């Protein structure tokens, strides 16, 4: 495995204090344990989504500050933070959500575009060292970016970066009932730009224009409270949020969604992601959920 440099190895983000193994905890909520990296090596070396332009580089110091503010907000909300240092050859490693999908003691690794494959050994090593059973994806798979846990349902994207055959793999490996959802263009290259889980089994937010007709009908058929988000706010990463059912951490610039969430009694924390967005990522992209609950006992 390539070596990380000293700057990444001593980055200020550190894992929180020692707890029982993640998959042996009492997991009754969601997004209470998150794996993050850092923005030490964040830059735009290639263009694999519509937001990336190699001639528009992020301000490095500002990107680091944005990421540190996101991590601080998670800790303030009471979320446990685990940390893996970024590697110099992996400019997108800050976007840990694409690394895998985790449930219980098992993880299915992502299978990203070729430009990001160098990240996988670092995440695989971390997961194995933390007692997860790690499976490799047999088809293209954008990790949690295209796989949103909603209780025992999995809202699973396809059509851009994830092969639909992965849905059966995820259902078998992780015990989910899969709800397939297709985004309509490369603009919505991951499902977490088009859909957000606000409260499992109760509240979802989505951009209808980002999904095809059958996918919209599937969401409406789930019987949950649906918050419709307009294209303008969705394009500013409004739906790329993290909710634990009490606090929603999201990007600034989406006042209508923020207001709708507050009307439902949720605490909303809005953060600047201007520089991170130049790599095509927001709040949700920067954290891999480690505590998706196992199926309820029958």
Image (cartoon, rainbow, N blue to C red):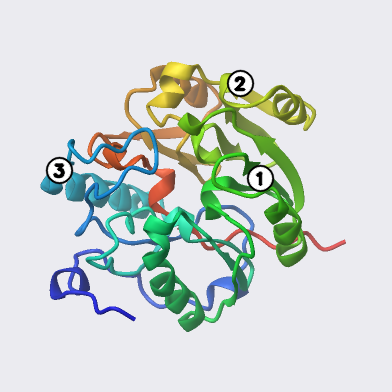
Q: Which mark identifies residue 62?
A: 3
Which quarter of the image is occupied by the C terminus?
Answer: bottom right
Asked whether 271 or 92 is in front, the reply is: 92
Side (left or right) of 150 relative to 124: right
Which residue corresponds to the image point at 34% horizontal and 81% vertical from the top-left?
1
Q: Is residue 252 visible?
A: yes
Which residue corresponds to the image point at 40% horizontal and 31% vertical from the top-left?
237
Which of label 1 and label 3 is nearer to you? 1
Which residue corresponds to the image point at 63% horizontal and 71% vertical from the top-left?
106
Asked whether 157 or 24 is in front, the reply is: 157
Residue 250 at x, y = what percent?
Answer: 39, 36
Residue furthest right in the image: 298
Question: Callout 2: few (<14), some (14-19), or many (20+) C-alpha neighbours within 10 Å?
Answer: many
Local secondary structure at mark 1 = strand
What is the C-alpha distance between the residues marked 1 and 3?
33 Å
Q: Image quarter for residue 204?
A: top right
Question: Callout 3: few (<14), some (14-19), or many (20+) C-alpha neighbours within 10 Å?
Answer: some
Among numbered discs 1 and 3, the one appearing first in the sequence:
3
Local secondary structure at mark 2 = helix
Local secondary structure at mark 3 = helix
What is the C-alpha distance between the residues marked 2 and 3?
32 Å
The residue under label 1 is 156
């Amino acid at each position: 495995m390539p070596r990380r440099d000293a700057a990444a190895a001593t980055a200020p983000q550190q894992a929180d204090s020692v707890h029982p193994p993640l998959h042996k905890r009492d997991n009754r909520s969601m997004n209470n344990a998150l794996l993050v990296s850092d923005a030490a090596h964040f830059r735009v070396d290639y263009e694999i989504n519509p937001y990336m332009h190699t001639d528009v580089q992020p301000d490095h110091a500002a990107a680091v500050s944005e990421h540190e503010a996101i991590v601080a907000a998670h800790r303030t909300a009471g979320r446990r933070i685990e940390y893996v240092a970024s590697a110099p050859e992996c400019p997108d490693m800050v976007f840990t959500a694409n690394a895998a999908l985790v449930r219980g003691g098992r993880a299915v690794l992502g299978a990203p575009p070729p430009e990001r494959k160098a990240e996988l050994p670092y995440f695989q090593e971390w997961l194995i060292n933390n007692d997860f059973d790690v499976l490799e994806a047999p088809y293209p798979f954008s990790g949690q970016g295209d796989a949103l846990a909603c209780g025992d349902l999995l809202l699973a994207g396809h059509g851009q970066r994830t092969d639909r055959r992965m849905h059966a793999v995820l259902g078998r490996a992780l015990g989910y009932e899969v709800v397939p959802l297709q985004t309509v263009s490369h603009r919505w290259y991951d499902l977490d730009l088009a859909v957000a889980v606000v409260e499992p089994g109760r509240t979802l937010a989505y951009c209808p224009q980002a999904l095809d007709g059958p996918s919209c009908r599937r969401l409406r058929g789930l019987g949950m409270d649906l918050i419709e988000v307009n294209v303008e706010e969705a394009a500013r990463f409004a739906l790329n949020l993290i909710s634990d059912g009490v606090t929603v951490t999201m990007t600034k610039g989406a006042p209508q969604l923020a207001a709708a969430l507050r009307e439902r009694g949720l605490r909303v924390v809005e953060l600047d992601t201007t520089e991170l967005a130049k790599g095509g990522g927001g709040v949700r992209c920067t954290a891999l959920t480690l505590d998706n609950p196992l199926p309820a006992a029958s």
